[in-house]
Image: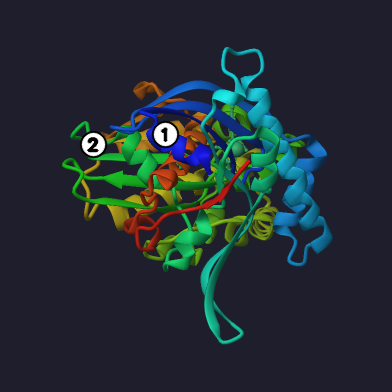
């Protein structure tokens, strides 16, 4: 407890953010300094620690199986607790920063289920979500107070539990008097938009990000990803296939809404592949069409839900998909004349931004401030997370 009380006295705190998204590509670990007064953030260190291939496959398997083995899930929670702790400790290795000088850790954990659709269960209508990487392990190994498991609190107050990055997005990039959209293309893609005078803000998941592409790249090209969008750029869009999958009900659903593997995971990807094969679409065109689906989902969401309410003057891209040049090219073409740039023009790193967001969310919790936004999740603003002490 003394650690927590000390944090409150500090004008500047050092916080580690730990994040692994639905892509399960690895743990993003970042060390930031946050100014208590204005919540300005300075990034000090960043590294991604890729999961060993077998561990990645286990996470994907547990995340997709309708009946995963409970012993395995239970073990995986503790295994990932160890990996997340190791990521926090290795991040500082060889640098001038010592773990003893880190005030706090904010850990998102690894999502293995996200079920935001209200479902009747034993007489209760519930939403559910499940992030693992046991935070007690992180707190004990690092000896740093750890805030984790942010999403359930938002669900408890009527929200979808996601997206939670919008308020950090606003803290990081708001305030330049321009209608702005931050588009984060991870496994799933999410967008945060605010108006010129910041009086209105809205955020939701647009649908698949890289998830479908990654699956198809593995199946068709034995690669983890379409590096820089090279294959997507060399093929052509199959309109029949594209139109078929744009009919997915998620795209016309009104926000607030959030998504995950339940909607756009393996089952969806297998259906996409089998439909493509029935239509005799060649392998390269399958990748282009899958990439186009991500972009069209964003564009549809923009036309339907954003444009009627917001004048967006610039789009800032972030997440692993920021490096996909097919996404960039197509978004620029579709959103013309609106600017489409990377968050790096604002001095931010697209790879670390989500981890930075969870460092901020952890600190907000300690400050006693809500981290969620009603206009993003549908939940009342509330304190998020669970605190584990060293
Ligand atoms: N150089 C690259 N070119 C194209 N896509 C990339 C590149 N680097 C990463 N990605 C994509 O980004 C994904 C990871 O993005 P990330 O933001 O970490 O997502 P998540 O939050 O779901 O983990 C990878 O699975 C891959 O599809
Ligand atoms: Mg990732």
Residue 69 placed where, x, y %? 82, 62
The colour style of the image is rainbow
Q: Residue at x 31, y 46 (%)?
A: 193
Near-viewer residue (67 or 312): 67
Disc 2 element: loop
Q: Residue at x 35, y 54 (%)?
A: 373
Q: Residue at x 38, y 33 (%)?
A: 9
Residue 225 placed where, x, y %? 66, 35
Residue furthest front in the image: 2
- The residue that mark 1 highlights is 317
Q: Is residue 387 above or below residue 338?
A: below
Residue 230 placed where, x, y %? 59, 28
Name which quarter of the figure residue 114 lies in.
Answer: bottom right
Residue 313, numbered circle:
2
- CB contact under 8 Å: marks 2 and 1: no
Report ligand 2 position as a quadrant: top right
Near-viewer residue (23 or 300): 23
Residue 137 placed where, x, y %? 70, 43
**How many numbered badges does the structure rendering display?**
2
């Amino acid at each position: 407890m003394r650690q927590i009380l000390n944090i409150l006295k500090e004008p500047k705190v050092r916080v580690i953010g730990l994040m692994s998204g639905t892509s399960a590509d690895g743990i993003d670990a970042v060390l930031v300094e946050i100014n208590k007064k204005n919540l300005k953030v300075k990034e000090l260190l960043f590294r991604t620690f890729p999961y060993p291939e077998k561990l990645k496959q286990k996470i994907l398997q547990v995340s997709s199986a309708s009946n995963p083995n409970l012993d395995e899930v239970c073990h995986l929670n503790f295994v990932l607790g160890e990996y997340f702790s190791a990521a926090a400790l290795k991040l500082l290795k060889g640098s001038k920063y010592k773990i003893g000088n880190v005030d706090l850790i904010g850990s998102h954990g690894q999502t293995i289920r996200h079920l935001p659709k209200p479902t009747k269960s034993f007489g209760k209508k519930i939403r559910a979500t499940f992030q693992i990487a046991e935070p007690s392990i992180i707190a004990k190994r690092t000896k740093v107070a750890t805030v984790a498991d942010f999403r359930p609190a938002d669900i408890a107050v009527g929200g979808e539990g996601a997206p939670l990055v919008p308020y950090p997005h606003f803290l990081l990039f708001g305030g330049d008097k321009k209608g702005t959209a931050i588009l984060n293309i991870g496994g799933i893609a999410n967008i945060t938009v605010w108006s010129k005078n910041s009086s209105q803000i809205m955020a939701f998941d647009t649908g698949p990000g890289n998830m479908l592409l990654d699956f198809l790249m593995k199946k068709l090209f034995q690669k983890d990803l379409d590096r820089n969008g090279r294959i997507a750029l060399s093929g052509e869009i199959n309109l029949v296939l594209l139109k078929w999958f744009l009919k997915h009900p998620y795209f016309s659903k009104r926000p607030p809404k959030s998504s995950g593997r339940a909607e756009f995971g393996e089952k969806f990807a297998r259906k996409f592949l089998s439909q493509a094969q029935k239509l005799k679409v060649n392998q390269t065109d399958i990748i282009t069409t899958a990439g186009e689906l991500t972009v069209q989902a964003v564009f549809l969401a923009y036309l339907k839900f954003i444009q009627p309410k917001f004048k967006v003057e610039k789009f800032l891209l972030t997440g692993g998909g920021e490096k996909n040049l097919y996404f960039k090219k197509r978004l620029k073409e579709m959103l013309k004349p609106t600017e489409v740039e990377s968050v790096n023009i604002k001095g931010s790193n697209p790879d670390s931004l989500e981890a930075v967001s969870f460092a901020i969310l952890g600190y907000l919790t300690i400050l006693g401030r809500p981290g969620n936004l009603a206009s993003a999740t549908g939940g009342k603003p509330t304190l998020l997370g669970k605190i584990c002490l060293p």
